[in-house]
Image: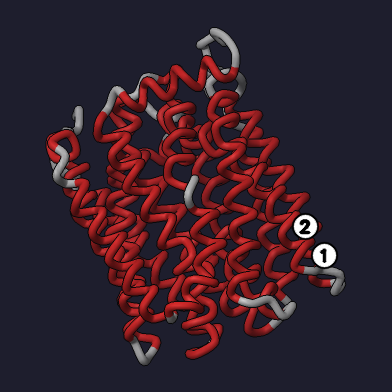
Amino acid sequence: MTTVAIERAGVLRHREFRLLVSGSTVSSFGNGITPVALAFAVLDLGGSAAELGLVEAAFSAAEVLTTLLGGVLGDRVSRRIMMQGSSLGSALVQAVLALTLVLHHASIGSLTVLGSVAGVLSALSGPASKAVTRMTVPEADLAGAVATRALLQQLAMTIGYAVGGILVALVDAGWAIMIDAATFAVAAACFSRLRIPEVTASPRGTVLAELGDGAREVLRHAWLWILIGQAMLYHLFYGGAQNVLGPVVVGQQMGRAAWGAALAWLMVGFVVGGLVCLRWRPRRSLFAGTALLATTALLPLAMAFASSPPLVWAGALLHGIGLSIFSVFWDLAIQQNVPDDKLSRVYSFDMVGSFVARPLGLALTGPIAEAVGFDRWLVVVAAVIGGSSLLALLSRDVRRLELTR
């Protein structure tokens, strides 16, 4: 079914797109393994929920601080070289992190530092990687390319989460993270073979001046800044629910494999959503995606009230479907409505606006949840992420933005 759907999209016939999705897909597989392995590595070192939150926050904070620079560079220099260099650096950092765990030299402090470096490397190439999609296919195939890339990456991450849950249950977390290092090396090899146009826009001033141009482009579109604000609330509350409370509430009460399976079902939801987007492109797709985004509240609700893994898995599946459909339609809206010479910077504002509050949420989730009760806090998370999605629909621009083809 998946193969048929992808063939109908027709985008894999383009060599550059195949190389792009090959590199991004294989690294997505590794990226699915590492969050599971890293979370339990911290817990195995005696870390608490609060300390796990601090490790996750360090990675996220490093991403936020570097992403805006990555956006400027993505509109100035070779996007291919940025992606290749970031992947090589990430391979090295993840290999070092894995070795510290395998050789039993790791500490919560070392995991925090190495996680921060990994966050910097990821952030430098993130906006450029997003902007490259429309450089690898003709304009007529852009919608299919966006949906197909999202589908393949989420399918790979689904498998990665499942493999990560199995590996941490059977072997040392370090060996799991070593696989992630290898996937980054493969991705770098794929990106090195890309033949895409270089960025034609010349720098017009300082980094701050170019960031100003990007900010004005964001503010020019009401749907952009409204949904970036909604994403800020989502990540402030949900990031800690998944990365801090998930391993504690589900992992310790129902078993580590149960939490790994929940993350896998979350990714299955992403895959299902991606398949839906290959066939379904409503004229007002941003409205449809934002409405479905409210289903993300179902996972924290299931974590709060479920007494058995299947209910958590069902919540994770529905969360993934809603978030996946929104993400594809959101990405397509940006690709179709932002000029190429500002695209990396707009993506950087999207990523920073979405994730700027995430480190705070990760750092505070543990202490707040321990103070008010894990279940109560999960209900608050569900109310915020579901309610903010519905509030965004009050915007006329969100409701009426249409696909250009």
Q: Nearer the viewer, residue 47 or 295?
A: 47
Residue 203 appears in the figure: yes
Which residue is tagged 2?
Answer: 95
Which residue in the protein does label 1 denote? 99
- Callout 1 touching callout 2 (CB < 8 Å): yes
Number of numbered discs: 2
Near-viewer residue (290 or 188): 290
Q: Position of residue 88 (x, y in %)?
A: 72, 43
Measured as percent of width and height from the top left, residue 233 is found at 37, 52
Q: Kindly identify the amino acid type of the residue bearing the numbered disc 1.
A: Leu
Identify whether 319 is placed above or below 345.
Answer: below
- Please identify the quarter of the rendering in which residue 174 is found: bottom right
Where is residue 161 shown, x and y percent of the image? 52, 69
Q: Callout 1: few (<14), some (14-19), or many (20+) C-alpha neighbours within 10 Å?
A: some
Please tell me which residue is depicted at 57% across the width and 9% down the height of the picture: 205
Specify few, some or many for label 2: CA neighbours under 10 Å numbering under 14, 14-19, or 20 or more: some
Q: Residue at x 51, y 34 (%)?
A: 127
Question: In the displayed structure, does residue 42 sit left or right of residue 10?
Answer: right
SS class, disc 1:
helix
Residue flagged by tag 2: what amino acid is it? Ala
Please give the name of the residue rendered at 19% of the width and 39% of the height, measured from the top-left corner: 398
Q: How is the image coloured?
A: secondary structure
Q: Secondary structure at mark 2?
A: helix
Residue at 32% x, 35% y: name it: 225
In the picture, the quarter occupied by the C terminus is top left
Residue 9's place in the image compared with 28, above or below, is: above
